[in-house]
Image (cartoon, rainbow, N blue to C red):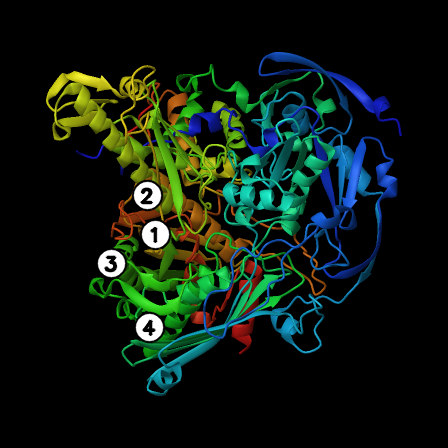
């Protein structure tokens, strides 16, 4: 059967609802008798709590209740460790997870201390002003190295230091490789924090139905099923008594998979206790303190190469900023460690990190999840080596790319899914060639750049490579049902935050059943509709849930053919599915509508034959043995204003390979959005903390997201190297766009400013920071 | 403090329908629209006037409903995203909405209502804008998902339709013609 829907730029099923304001977001819920929560949060980053008095608040108009840690009683306990430490020999790991409301001390600014419940959010916030908390400010641990130094303020006083983890992974013997190298280059690299900044803040609505003994929770989460399972355990309910719905979510980008946020634990408990629905919606200011963040790392790194630029080994020793708690384990630094190797052959690798507790907001994955840092370090080291060896930047990369005959490629270290880091498939050199061709690299370097420079213009080009481990397990599931009206319903557990799941999953189903895409009604993220699975993270929706949809629809297809074969009295091989019907090949008049067939499969009289099931429905699961590895090359040409140091991106090219493409239009959107996020990370966005752990730029006035005038038109090219690890041949694409942008900015800006001899070893940058770096270079 | 004493009567017209309501002086227009009138298509992203998600039309002009109090719009006419389409079905989408659908001009869709209502009066006054002009107009609306490219494509496509340059049918991006609805 020819492809009709898979691989086509079908426009999205979900859009009419979103475009007309009819899509349900969490804050749109209005339930009778609903109460509203507001949280009193710590102004200090590190302080001891001596006393809490909210008695006055309880007497204010509209206030129904208030709770602090003590008032939560036995319900109060630290949150779960979501990801245990990986099975790496000698790994040290101390889990200290976040608490529902601060007890005894606060460990980061914005940590909640008291929750007020009132008839409206306005009244709840009014009441916060009357709460008196006596606190003793403590010195804060903010800088990573200082936090580990002897005598640093202890964040978790039951530990000897602020060290949260120490993990070393090795392959080969870097030290001997370095001895045999023609060149070893080394530097210190910095990558600082940014916000995920989904335009929708977090929120939760909880409704306890006393008569049905059933809890319904609407949550801006990327992982509704684990939230359901966890809440049931916390609240002493069975899992079937709890339904968690992640309706339309206004952007996820990672932090919405954190669990449990304090508000997520507290709101359902209050709803059950007061027997009234409650709502909490985070405001933007809270989001800057209370929603998790990412990207603080300091790397000391070395690269050993031959004279020809062949990589002999890499040594990377880094510090990773956990923030105040570490519920997400080591996922982020393990990703940094693994992604550093990139698309290259690296025979010897020594990677060692220390994760550090600091008095800052908790760190969990944000789009890219540690991969940015690894790519930044490796790409910068290659640039440094190329310069020392007099090699072209593209050429040193080409010489080290893995060849197609080297797959699957086992890097002999452990990845975030605890499986050995193994690349399933790839064809890297054509990606590099295509990117160089699209941006016309050689002509730019040999002709345009010298010409423009002679006119006094600071122009530069960058080209960087990356891989992204995507689509990890454990598993997802899907249920496909042909409805009597001829439509098809599809339920899967993953939540959706704008990735187009209502369409790409529908395309997979439509392709197998020969129905139109808009006839497939997709439900995602509602445990009432499907309650097995994990969530939307690690660029895994299309790979894992998509493959589950595929498996389920193939089973439905088999059922359709079996039933129709009996009714039409022909063999199954002589049947085809098209136009919403099953028919004898070449006999259009024989068509039996799928709706009609669904009715026949669910008879009101007569028996359903033994060994068969009623209906045209199937549920299936997919769990990949390991992740599939996508890859790409980004290239850009920038011009820097010599006076203001503002940067103008003249051209931006992405060549990407994520296996087979389900919907090119949606894929382009994912890449473009990722690049924009990356541009923000690289040049506009930085969360700036002072020495007391106070965030200095916690508003959209001061924390700059890139706008439509900052993000250029992105030219994209695709290659398709199918993954052998799933039947669709797909790889993930959600995070890729954001991953290499910091490395690309650094290289292109360094090139543009190369007459000044400036070296860029840090991200994020800004015009101000570029100015400082230039001043330093000029004074040397 | 007697909160009841602070309530004010207002009469406003939203999407052609008249409403009489009692509001506190401090009630934000965004909260009034969303929670008192149930028009939840207007979204709130920052409540300090930067992100633009809450943009609505006040007497035909784009304004940020998080920077206005409900009492300030007494006697005035508003349009929200719910007022754009001419009916319920996808065939009755406003050409601007249809352009966003055709061009994949939205992902999570949270910022989209504000973007639509920013563009609508602009395109009425400037029927044939350049890409650069559209990027300037859109620079007050933050979107974290799309990277703006397909938002700009959608705005350009809508301008072609609305100015009559390409008849009534909008053209999707290349490769986007396999539409199924």
> Of residues A477 and A465, which is closer to you in this image?
A477
Dot 2 falls on a residue whose secondary structure is helix
Which percent across, then down, holds residue A330? 51, 63
Crowding at mark 3 (Cα within 10 Å: few <14, some 14-19, many 20+) = many
Q: Farthest left residue?
A: A586
Check if mark 3's residue and mark 1's residue have beta carbons within 8 Å. no
**Between disc 4 and disc 1, whose residue precedes?**
4
Q: From the image, tell me which residue sits under label 4.
A: A346
Label 3 lies in what chain? A
Foreground residue among A96 and A142: A96
Q: Are marks 2 and 4 in contact (CB under 8 Å)?
A: no
From mark 3 to mark 4, how far is it between C-alphas? 17 Å
Q: What residue lies at 56% left-to-right and 55% top-to-bottom?
A: A194
Dot label at residue A547 = 2
User: Residue B149: x and y, percent?
Assistant: 41, 40
Residue B93 visible in image: yes
Q: CA distance from mark 2 to mark 1?
A: 9 Å
SS under mark 1:
loop
Q: Are marks 3 and 4 on the same chain?
A: yes
C-alpha distance separating marks 2 and 3: 23 Å
Cα–Cα span, label 4 and label 1:
26 Å
- The residue that disc 1 covers is A624
Is disc 2 in the same subunit as disc 1? yes
Vertical comparison of B54 with A438: above or below = above
Front: mark 4 or 1: 1
Whether label 2 touches label 3, CB < 8 Å: no
Q: Residue at x 69, y 61 (%)?
A: A693
Residue beneath label 3, please? A427
Mark 4 or mark 2, which is nearer the start of the sequence? 4
- Contact? badges 2 and 1 (CB < 8 Å): yes
Of the two numbered discs 3 and 4 on the same chain, state the one appearing first in sequence: 4
């Amino acid at each position: 059967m020819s492809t009709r829907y898979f691989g086509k730029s079908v426009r999205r099923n979900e859009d009419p609802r979103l475009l007309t304001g009819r899509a349900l977001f969490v804050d749109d819920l209005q339930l009778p008798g609903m109460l509203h929560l507001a949280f009193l949060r710590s102004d200090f980053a590190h302080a001891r709590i001596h006393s809490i008095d909210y008695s006055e608040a309880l007497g204010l108009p509209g206030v129904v209740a208030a709770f602090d840690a003590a008032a939560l009683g036995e319900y109060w306990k630290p949150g779960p460790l979501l990801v245990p430490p990986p099975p790496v020999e000698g790994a040290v790991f101390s889990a200290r997870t976040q608490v529902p409301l601060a007890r005894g001390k606060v460990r980061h600014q914005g940590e909640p201390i008291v929750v007020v419940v009132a008839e409206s959010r306005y009244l709840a916030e009014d009441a916060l002003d009357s709460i008196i908390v006596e606190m003793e400010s403590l010195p804060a641990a903010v800088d990573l190295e200082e936090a580990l130094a002897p005598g640093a303020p202890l964040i978790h006083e039951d530990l000897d230091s602020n060290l949260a983890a120490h993990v070393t992974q090795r392959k080969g013997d870097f030290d001997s490789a370095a001895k045999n190298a023609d060149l070893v280059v080394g530097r210190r690299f910095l990558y600082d924090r940014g916000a995920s900044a989904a335009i929708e803040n977090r929120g939760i609505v909880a409704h306890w139905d006393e008569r049905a003994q059933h809890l319904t929770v609407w949550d801006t989460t990327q992982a509704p099923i684990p939230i359901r399972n966890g809440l049931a355990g916390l609240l002493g309910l069975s899992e079937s008594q709890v339904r968690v719905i992640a309706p339309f979510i206004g952007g996820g980008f990672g932090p919405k998979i954190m669990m449990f946020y304090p508000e997520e634990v507290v709101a359902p408990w209050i709803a059950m206790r007061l027997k009234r629905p409650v709502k909490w919606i985070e405001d933007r200011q809270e989001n800057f303190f209370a929603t998790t963040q990412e990207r603080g790392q300091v790397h000391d790194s070395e690269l050993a190469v031959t004279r020809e630029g062949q990589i002999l080994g890499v040594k990377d020793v880094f510090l990773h900023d956990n923030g105040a708690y570490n519920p997400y384990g080591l996922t982020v630094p393990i990703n940094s460690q693994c992604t550093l190797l990139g698309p290259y052959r690296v025979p010897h690798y020594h990677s060692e990190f220390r994760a550090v507790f600091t008095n800052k907001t908790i760190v969990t994955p944000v789009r890219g999840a540690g991969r940015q840092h690894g790519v930044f370090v490796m790409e910068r080291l290659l640039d440094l080596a190329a310069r020392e060896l007099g090699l072209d930047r593209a050429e040193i990369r080409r010489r080290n790319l893995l060849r197609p005959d080297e797959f699957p490629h086992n890097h002999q270290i452990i990845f975030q899914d605890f499986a050995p880091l193994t690349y399933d498939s790839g064809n890297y050199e054509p990606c590099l060639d295509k990117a160089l061709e699209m941006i016309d690299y050689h002509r730019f370097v040999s002709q345009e750049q010298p010409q423009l420079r002679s006119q006094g213009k600071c122009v530069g080009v960058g080209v960087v490579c990356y891989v992204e481990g995507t689509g990890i397990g454990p598993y997802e599931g899907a249920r496909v049902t042909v409805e009597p009206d001829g439509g098809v319903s599809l339920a899967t557990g993953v939540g959706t935050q704008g990735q187009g799941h209502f369409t790409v999953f529908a395309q997979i189903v439509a392709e197998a059943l020969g129905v139109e895409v808009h006839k497939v009604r997709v439900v995602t993220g509602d445990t009432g509709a499907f309650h097995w699975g994990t969530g939307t993270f690690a660029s895994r929706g299309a790979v894992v849930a998509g493959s589950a949809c595929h498996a389920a629809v193939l089973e439905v297809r088999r059922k359709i053919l079996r039933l129709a074969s009996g009714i039409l009295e022909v063999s199954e091989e002589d049947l085809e599915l098209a136009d919403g019907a099953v028919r004898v090949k070449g006999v259009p008049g024989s068509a039996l509508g799928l709706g009609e067939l669904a009715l026949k499969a669910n008879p009101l009289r007569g028996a359903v034959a033994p060994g068969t099931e009623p209906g045209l429905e199937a549920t299936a699961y997919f769990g990949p043995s390991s992740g599939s590895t996508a890859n790409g090359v980004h290239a850009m040409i920038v011009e820097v204003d010599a006076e203001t140091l503002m940067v103008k991106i003249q051209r931006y090219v992405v060549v990407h390979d994520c296996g087979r493409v389900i919907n090119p239009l949606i894929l382009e959107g994912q890449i473009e959005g990722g690049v924009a996020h990356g541009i923000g990370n690289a040049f506009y966005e930085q969360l700036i903390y002072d020495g007391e752990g106070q965030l200095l730029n916690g508003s959209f006035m001061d924390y700059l997201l890139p706008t439509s005038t900052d993000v250029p038109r992105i030219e994209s090219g695709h290659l398709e190297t199918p993954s052998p690890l799933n039947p669709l041949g797909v790889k993930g694409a959600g995070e890729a766009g954001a991953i290499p942008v910091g490395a690309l900015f650094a290289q292109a800006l360094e090139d543009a400013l190369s007459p000044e001899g400036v070296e860029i070893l840090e991200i994020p940058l800004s015009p101000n920071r570029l100015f400082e770096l230039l001043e330093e270079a000029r004074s040397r | 403090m007697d909160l009841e004493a602070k309530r004010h009567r207002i009469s406003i017209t939203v999407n052609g329908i008249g409403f009489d309501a009692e509001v506190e002086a401090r009630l934000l227009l965004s909260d009034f629209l969303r929670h008192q009138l149930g028009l939840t298509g207007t979204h709130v992203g920052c409540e300090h006037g930067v992100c633009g998600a809450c943009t609505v039309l006040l007497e035909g002009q784009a304004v940020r409903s998080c920077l206005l109090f409900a009492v300030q719009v007494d006697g005035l006419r508003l349009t929200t995203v719910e007022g754009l389409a001419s009916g319920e079905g996808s065939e009755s989408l406003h050409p601007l909405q249809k352009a966003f659908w055709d061009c994949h001009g939205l992902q999570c869709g949270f910022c989209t209502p504000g973007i639509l209502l920013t563009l609508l009066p602009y395109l009425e006054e400037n029927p044939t804008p350049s890409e650069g002009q559209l990027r300037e107009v859109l620079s007050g609306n933050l979107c974290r998902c799309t990277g703006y490219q397909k938002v700009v494509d959608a705005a350009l496509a809508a301008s072609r339709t609305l100015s009559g340059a390409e008849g009534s049918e909008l053209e999707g991006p290349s490769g986007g013609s396999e539409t199924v609805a």
